[in-house]
Amino acid sequence: MPKKILIVDDQFGIRVLLQEVLQREGYTIFQANNGPTALDIVQKENPDLILLDMKIPGMDGLEILRVIRKLEVETKVIMMTAYGELNLIREAMELGALAHFTKPFDIDELRQAVNAHLM
């Protein structure tokens, strides 16, 4: 059964790019452009990995990550962030995020990290 990845980003172009790259790797992809949609997918689909943007209007990545941890689902999280949000990255790592990528990221590096964490 293919591993499931949830991409959470308010930028449509990033979601589509990541979906195309990761579907080629054989993963089942879900997309969310906001926190409530992401949390709904987490509860229904229990993804193996979440690629989570730090800055999302309404409910930011840290808030989403905190709620996911309260749900006690076993999912891995990789944060995506704009440059210079080191204090937010540190907090995300304390909440169990495995890694972070700064936008614009190298798509091959991100793909390799996803593969490494899902093996």
Image (cartoon, rainbow, N blue to C red):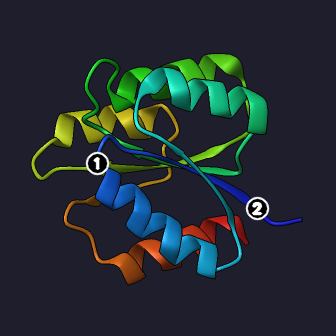
Amino acid of disc 2: Lys
42 relative to 51, above or below:
above
Amino acid of disc 1: Gln
Marker disc for residue 11:
1
Q: Label 2 crowding class (10 Å Cα cut-off): few <14, some 14-19, many 20+?
A: few
Marker disc for residue 34:
none
Quadrant in the picture for residue 44: top right
Q: Is residue 35 left or right of residue 117?
A: left
Q: Label 1 crowding class (10 Å Cα cut-off): few <14, some 14-19, many 20+?
A: few
Q: Residue at x 29, y 41 (%)?
A: 89
Label 1 sits on a secondary structure element that is loop
Label 2 sits on a secondary structure element that is loop
Q: Give how far across and how far down residue 107 sits, in percent.
A: 36, 77
Q: Is residue 88 left or right of residue 91?
A: left
Q: Which of the image's four quarters has the N terminus?
A: bottom right
* Residue in the foreground of this view, choosing between 17 and 81: 17
Residue 67 appears anywhere in the view: yes
Which residue is denoted by mark 2 in the rendering? 3
